[in-house]
């Protein structure tokens, strides 16, 4: 999945389409039709802090933003009731509303709440054909803060897994186990990124002078919108000032290489990709947030194997 990030990956999982087709191309996306760079998880402008969903003040409607069919109506049309279990803080977020159409959504507080509630629901509806989606963000959050190889992130996954086994798996009745399949996967990986001042845009005023707007997308895969005639200077600057290196594509070269997947291209695709796309090597990145200091020891969005490879585990319960 490119970019290897939540907003793009989850939209693909709920539509079956590539980022090139659905148009959700990163954490931050330039939406020409709204004349702003938007946070595609919070559905809020990137230029000021505010509540989630404030794009609605500009006429943004998450339920109508995607023009593609989504998974929920397809499941219902085939006699399957779809559910989503997500942390209460994001259960009805703009991102969820965007692709979870005709889904019965349940919010939870903790791992125990998730697995007990999920087990009780399955047990209470033995005759119903169900598709149940659960999303757990704890490992990702701790990996961002401390790095993906930190003890806290490892302990979080162990805690999540133990709760799954204790409160769901071991207590699920034989009747509920029958014809039940469990799949475990992730929307992306992460790579450790030690904090380095050189990776902050505020320390590169010469580079900023060549940009029409701040970079967009991801710290590890960055879209640059250039002033006319500045491409050679930007390429030279990046190669000189990032010793760990980067690979630079024009928008058209990236699309020709299929980096955003197959299928019919979204009508706003080219506007959302900028002029140059920068893939950072090793643990390099670019941080450009003006209102907060760089803090993340783990990141994703790029093409490193640690960001791209995810597990896919399956088990029949009965």
Image (spheres, helix red, strand yellow):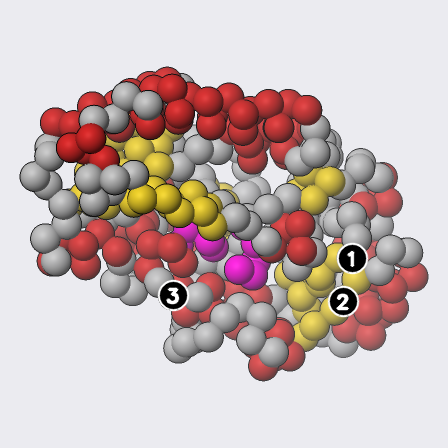
Task: Tell me the SS state at disc 2.
Answer: strand
**What residue is at 46 percent from the left and 75 percent from the top?**
262
The quadrant where residue 173 appears: top left
Q: Which residue is mark 2?
A: 247
- Mark 3 and mark 2 lie on one chain; the one further toward the N terminus is 3
Q: Quadrant of the C terminus?
A: top left
**What residue is at 64 percent from the left and 44 percent from the top?**
190
**Mark 1 burial class by Cα count in 10 Å: few <14, some 14-19, many 20+:** some
- Residue 316 placement (x, y as % from top left): 31, 44
Task: Tell me the SS state at disc 1.
Answer: loop
Q: Say left or right for 175 vs 242.
A: left
Q: Say left or right for 237 vs 153.
A: right
Q: Which residue is mark 1?
A: 281
Q: Which residue is mark 3?
A: 17
- Mark 1 and mark 2 lie on one chain; the one further toward the N terminus is 2
**What residue is at 57 percent from the left and 66 percent from the top?**
273
The quadrant where residue 12 appears: bottom left
Stretch in magenta = 1-11
Q: Is residue 44 above or below residue 164?
A: below
Report the Cα–Cα distance between label 1 and label 2: 7 Å
Report the Cα–Cα distance between label 3 and label 1: 27 Å
- Residue 182 placement (x, y as % from top left): 34, 42
Tell me, yes or no, if residue 152 can be seen here: yes
- Residue 250 placement (x, y as % from top left): 67, 75
């Amino acid at each position: 999945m490119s970019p290897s990030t939540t907003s793009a990956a989850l939209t693909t999982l709920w539509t079956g389409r590539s980022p090139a087709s659905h148009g959700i191309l990163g954490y931050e996306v330039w939406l020409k039709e709204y004349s702003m760079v938007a946070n595609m998880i919070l559905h809020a402008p990137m230029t000021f802090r505010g509540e989630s969903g404030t794009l609605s003040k500009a006429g943004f409607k998450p339920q109508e933003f995607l023009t593609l069919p989504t998974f929920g109506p397809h499941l219902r049309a085939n006699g399957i009731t779809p559910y989503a279990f997500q942390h209460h803080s994001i259960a009805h977020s703009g991102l969820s509303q965007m692709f979870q159409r005709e889904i019965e959504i349940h919010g939870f507080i903790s791992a125990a709440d998730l697995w007990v509630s999920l087990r009780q629901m399955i047990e209470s509806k033995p005759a119903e054909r169900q598709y149940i989606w659960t999303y757990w963000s704890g490992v990702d959050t701790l990996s961002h803060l401390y790095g993906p190889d930190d003890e806290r992130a490892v302990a979080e996954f162990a805690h999540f897994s133990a709760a799954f086994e204790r409160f769901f798996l071991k207590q699920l009745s034989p009747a509920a186990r029958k014809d039940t399949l469990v799949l475990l996967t992730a929307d992306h990986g992460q790579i450790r990124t030690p904090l380095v001042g050189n990776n902050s845009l505020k320390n590169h005023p010469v580079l900023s002078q060549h940009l029409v707007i701040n970079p967009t997308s991801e710290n590890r895969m960055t879209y640059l919108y250039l002033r006319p005639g500045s491409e050679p200077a930007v390429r030279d600057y990046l190669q000189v000032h990032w010793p760990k290196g980067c690979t630079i594509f024009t928008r058209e070269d990236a699309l020709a290489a299929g980096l955003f997947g197959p299928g019919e291209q979204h009508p706003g695709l080219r506007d959302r990709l900028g002029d140059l796309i920068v893939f950072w090597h090793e643990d390099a990145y670019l941080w450009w947030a003006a209102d907060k200091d760089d803090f993340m020891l783990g990141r994703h969005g790029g093409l490193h194997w640690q960001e791209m490879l995810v597990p896919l585990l399956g088990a029949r319960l009965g």
